[in-house]
Each structure stands twice: as C-alpha cells, then as structure tokens.
Amino acid sequence: MNFEDENRRVEESLLRRFAGEYSPSVQRTLYRMGKAAWESAGDGEDFTPKIPNEHYFLFDLSAFELENENEMFYLSKATFGDIEATVSRS
C-alpha cells in the first residue's frame, strides 16, 4: 500500500464528512470523520480526529432595526480548547 495514496483517500473522506454533510453537533461530526477515515484506510486500528472548540455568536443587528437571519456571526475570542474522539476497530 502506497502511503501517499492512502493519505489522500483519508483526507478526501475527512473533507466529504466535514464539509459535505449536515451534523447537529461537533461530537457527531468527529465520530463521522473518524469512521470515514477508518473505513477509507487499508490499515490501522484507530483514528482520532481533533478540532478546535470554537464558538460563533449571531450578530445582533436590532440596534440598526435590522434582522439577522442566521447570516452574520462572530468568533468568540475565548479559548475553549479542543474536542477529540477516537474511532476504533473492534
């Protein structure tokens, strides 16, 4: 097995899960990313994706007599660490 080919397959599977599907939570996203990587890789016992725990808040535009219909958000400057999950073969 060629490492570069396998790495490319895993990266593509991660991107499809992360950007191509709706997920109601970060935890579910991580699980699905881990499962996709595990399924696309030929070898390996487990996979542990880790992403930053960032919070985005809706801009309040009411002072301008405007309504923000989930279009404009800002990133909190507070640090919330990372979230990770491990998907393993049984």
Image (cartoon, rainbow, N blue to C red):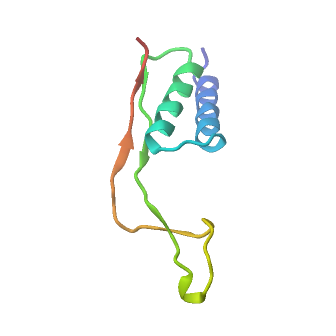
Q: How many marks?
A: 0
User: Image point 62% across, 77% down: which residue?
Assistant: 67
User: Image point 58% across, 29% down: which residue?
Assistant: 10
Q: Is 78 or 62 nearer to us in this picture?
A: 62
| Extreme residue in the bottom direction | 64
Q: Is residue 27 left or right of residue 18?
A: left
Q: Is residue 67 left or right of residue 54?
A: right
Q: Is 51 or 56 nearer to us in this picture?
A: 56
Q: Is residue 83 above or below residue 3?
A: below
Where is residue 27 shown, x and y percent of the image?
Answer: 43, 39
- Which image quarter: residue 54? bottom left
Q: Quadrant of the C terminus?
A: top left
Where is residue 70 shown, x and y percent of the image?
Answer: 60, 65
Q: Quadrant of the N terminus?
A: top right
Where is residue 44 shown, x and y percent of the image?
Answer: 46, 17
Q: Is residue 77 above or below residue 7?
A: below
- Which image quarter: residue 49? top left
User: Image point 47% across, 44% down: which residue?
Assistant: 25
Where is residue 46 shown, x and y percent of the image?
Answer: 42, 21
Q: Is residue 20 left or right of residue 82?
A: right
User: Image point 43% across, 60% down: which residue?
Assistant: 55
Q: Is residue 41 above or below residue 52?
A: above
